[in-house]
Each structure stands twice: as structure tokens, then as C-alpha cells.
Image (cartoon, grey):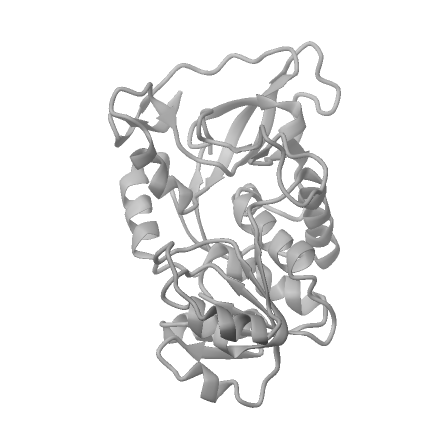
Amino acid sequence: MKAVYVEQQQVRVGELEVPKIGAKDVLVRIKAAGLNRRDLYTPKRLTKDAAPLILGSDAAGIIEAVGDEVTRVQAGDAVIVNPSLRWYDESAVPPDDFEILSLPDHGTFAEFLAISEEQVEIKPAQLSFVEAATIGIAPLTGYRAVVTKGQVKAGDTVFIPGAGSGVATFMIPLAKSLGARVIVSSRSAEKRQAALELGADMALANDADWLQELADETVDVVIESVGRETFNRSLAVLKRGGTLVVFGATTEDMVDFDLRTFFYAQQTLKGSTLGSRDEFRAMLQWIEAQNMHPVIDRTYSLDEAAAALKYLEINEQFGKLVFEVNN
């Protein structure tokens, strides 16, 4: 089968064996696979002598075969892969054996994927396979950040720096559906306009004076993923007693901030990573109820992996990038 994999810390496109399934596994014929920034970092985390590893955490496809003990799905079912491995029940933190698909296990950038039946869910009928391939890391991360950790409710004002990411393009309509006012930021005027068209109430330039621009706003929740570049500015516009949820650091991991200002303001800082199967299923129910369709920036073939990863790295997209497979 054709696959995009890492070998000797280099990303390659080539032929690998179709994986075998165990008694409780399913073999998914991948129709489309979504890219995430995680796919940029994985090659650097492997040693040069590591066995070839297929990249990719998100995908949608059709069940090709099932193991002898599989009961939840059957051959022919259209499914979405849940990349949050072995985290079934909603909890404050993931279980000790939690991992994200594609490290150390083979991922989704291939024509076939073998995975436990517990990690697939029936695809909502309204979604194409390309759209469904984005329903993984980004929306699950966004759902947990907004609903579980941020506890966003009607009447809240939510600030989301970094308007163009796949997570942000999911969080904007999610927060709006909960009755929140949504403010975003981006360095790109095109992304700011696209965010407004997606439902954001206000869009700020990254180089604007946020304190001045938001002087008449009361920001109840900030959902941060940019990192060092925006962290302190985000904290500064958060109201006294407000909550800042962090799920990523696109720029830089390490930040310094004024503890005294933070604790006098009685603010709350929460970390968030991906989410449980309970949250994944709740997110799917929300998608179906809202007739939501993910924002797709562009699609590629597996042979165009180098171009796709390069475009992802420069971070110019608005919405998700997707490989079309087995079409």
C-alpha cells in the first residue's frame, strides 16, 4: 500500500505492507486523512535507526475487514478514526496508557489502517470523507478546551488568538452555538475576514493594541494555543476572575509572566490536551445537530506530501489540510 512515513528522520512516500488485524481490530480503507502540526514534529522525535513509522492521526474511511471478536462495527461501515487512544471516559486527566495515534503506532497517511474497534465511530452522513477526515485532533481539542475546560456559556465573551488554525475554525462556531460572543486575532487580514464570515463577532490584528481595542469588552475566557508570542497579551486582556485555557504553543513553549498580577486578579490557568471518547462522541453529536461542516483550506494526494507539509509549516492556511486517498 502507498504510505507517507518517516525513515531515518526523513519523510518519504513509498510502498509498505498492508497491516494485519487482531481479533478486536478493524482494517480501515482510508478515503481521506487530515494533517496536523503534530505531523511536523514527529520526525524529529524518532531516532535515525527507528523502524519506518507512518505519519497521520486523523482519517475517515470504510471498514474493509473486522477481527473475529469485533462487535461494534462491520465491513462496509463508513467511519471516523478517533486519534485519542485508550481515553474512554471523560476525566480531569487522561489515563496513564493514553497516547495519540501515529507515535508509537502507525498513523493514517496510508491506504489502510489497522486499529482497535474502540477507536472508530460511525461517520455523520452529512460529512464527505474529506470533511470527516478533519474530525479528529482539532475539533476534539477545541471541544474539550471550550466546553470541558473553558465551561463557556451563554453571555460569555471568548477570545481566541490565532484565527486560522483548524482548532480555531471549529471553536468559533462551537462557542457561538453556546451563546458566546467570540473575538479572534490574526496577523492576516484575509484570515480575520474569513473568521468574521465564520461567525466571529470581532477580529483583531496581531500587532494591534489589544488592551485598547478591548477596553470596552469583558473577556471571560481566553483559549490560547500560540504560546510565547501572545500568552502575556492574552492574560492582560482577561478579566479579573477569568479563565485562560492553553492547549498548544505554536510559537515557543517557555513563557514568563507576572505571578503577582495573576494571583491578585484571581485568574485561573488550565491546561488541556485532546480529549476522551465521551467528549469525542459529544462533539460528533454537536456536529450532527448543528449540521456543521468543517473548514477545508485545500486537499493533496499522498504523492504531494512534501508540498502539504511545507504549506502546513508556513502556517498560511485557514482551516484544515487533507490528503485524499483511495479515490
Would residue 17 be found to the left or right of residue 81 on screen? left
Quadrant showing the N terminus:
top left
Q: Is residue 111 above or below residue 127?
A: above
Rendering coords of residue 202 (x, y %): 53, 80
Name the residue located 68 percent from the left edge and 72 percent from the top edge. 180
Q: Residue at x 70, y 42 (%)?
A: 91
Q: Residue furthest front?
A: 260
- The image quadrant of residue 121 is top right
- Name the residue at 75% across, 19% down: 71
Instruction: Depth check: give the residue in front, 184 or 191.
Output: 184
State the image quarter where residue 132 is shown: top right
Tell me residue 55's x, y (percent). Answer: 40, 32
Residue 75 placement, left or right of 315: right
In this rendered view, identify the residue nearer to me: 216 or 324.
216
Q: Is residue 184 visible?
A: no
Above or below for 56 versus 246? above
Q: Residue at x 32, y 29 (%)?
A: 46
Q: Position of residue 44 (x, y in %)?
A: 30, 36
